Amino acid sequence: MELRPRRRLLLLLALICLRAPRLASAQQPDEATVIVKGSTRIAETDDNYVCATIDWWPPEKCNYNQCPWGQASILNLDLDHPFLAQAIQAFDHLRIRLGGSLQDRVVYDVGTESPCSPFTNVSNALFGFSVGCLGMDRWDKLNDLFERTGAIVTFGVNALYGRYNVRRSIWAGKWNSTNAYDFVKYTISKGYPVGSWEFGNELSGHGIGAKVDAKLYGKDVIEFKSILRQLYKAPLSQPLLLAPGGFFDQQWYSQLLETSGHGVVNALSHHVYNLGGGNDVHLIRKILDPKYLDRAEDTYRDMQLTIQRHGTWASAWVSESGGVFNNGGPLVSNTFINSIWYLDQLGMASKYNTKVFCRQTLIGGNYGLLDTQTFLPNPDYYRQG
């Protein structure tokens, strides 16, 4: 099946799933007829709408007395496992977003950076971990996998490098672009086709662990865009610049677009975790409640309006969505019941012109499309059409 018909089928099935609960409830199992009029297009996604993430979390990432990450991070995932390559290839150019909470704690072992040390537990540090490092030998191996499988790569850049914590979660100071510059330059020199670069992770609005003022962030996004334009010399080879990869805050996002200006941010990216934490005993009830799921629609609608008012040159991306924060819900996020939430989100996001939807995760945590231990598909893996 070619990609474009499959994408249409995905959106059709997801939108039907989104609206079907309104027609028949669990208490009244009557038959219902759903009529889909395909003559009018209300929105359009990217050809590669479906995306999955690989995160930075080490095995020591634990919540609620569970440590579900194992060897599933950017730094330690078994890239030679045959099931991994097969799972990626089956999507026909799957988008893979490399990023997550620890991305703003990562340095790249290129240029003047040394030594290259792994993440270690530090109780009073951001997210409880030290600064970590991506070695270029590991980056080479990752790109070998991506090239073999036809993956389209989005890489999340450290946006806190050079900044300092002034109080509580507030970070100030100018972003130091030298390490990112050297890393992008190395990537280009090796011919690695990164399709998009995302600046920072969850630093918008109130932030998660850390936050940066929108005006300051916007100025640094301009600098990063300048680096990309300088290093990618051919106009047609220019990758997309995504920002801010955080939770949507309308005022903050509007200020980012106004500060960075026309054509700088190609895609306004946000994250969706609308079901609560991994220890929530009501997760299944929320997933089965259409009114609860509908609450997320306000976010997609407001994102669309923000782009229309402040940045018509940009598109909307969901660059991370696992539904349940803190590793996903055990025995929920990796089971059939989660597909109700997942398909609902795919349909709802597409309705508001979201171009790309990245599922947290491809592998890792409780919400992986693949089982962390066996690499076999979990139920949601099959929901992409």
Image (spheres, rainbow, N blue to C red):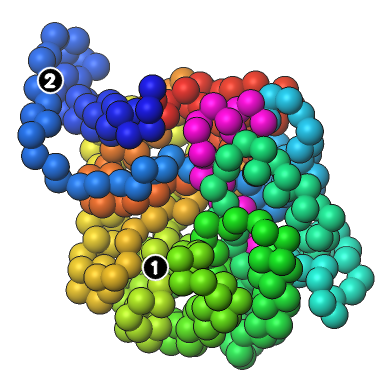
Q: Which image quarter: residue 111?
A: bottom right
Q: Position of residue 350 (x, y in %)?
A: 28, 44
Q: Which image quarter: residue 164?
A: bottom right
Please name whichever residue, 68 or 268, is drawn nearer the observer in this view of the structure: 268
- Image quadrant holding the N terminus, namely top left
Residue most extreme to the right = 115
Q: Kindly identify the residue that appears in the image at 12 percent across and 20 percent down.
A: 34
Q: Left of 283 or right of it: where is 169?
A: right
Asked which secondary structure carries label 2, the reply is: loop
Q: Kindly identify the residue that appears in the image at 32 percent across and 61 percent down.
A: 315
- The crowding category of the residue bearing disc 1, from other C-alpha atoms within 10 Å (few below 14, some 14 to 19, many at least 20), is many
Camera sees residue 234: yes
Residue most extreme to the bottom = 173
Which residue range is magenta in the image?
A: 85-103
Q: Position of residue 23 (x, y in %)?
A: 13, 23
For badge 1, the amino acid type reads Asn
Q: Kindly identify the residue that appears in the image at 60 percent across and 76 percent down.
A: 231
Q: Is residue 89 magenta?
A: yes
Q: Left of 195 or right of it: where is 165?
A: right
Asked which secondary structure carries label 1, the reply is: loop
Residue position marked by numbered label 1 in the rendering:
266
Residue position marked by numbered label 2 in the rendering:
34
Please name whichever residue, 144 or 270, is drawn nearer the observer in this view of the structure: 144
Q: Position of residue 47 (x, y in %)?
A: 36, 43
Q: Position of residue 238 (x, y in %)?
A: 49, 68
In this view, 15 is above or below 270: above
For badge 2, the amino acid type reads Val
Residue depth check, mark 1 versus mark 2: number of the one nearer the observer: 1
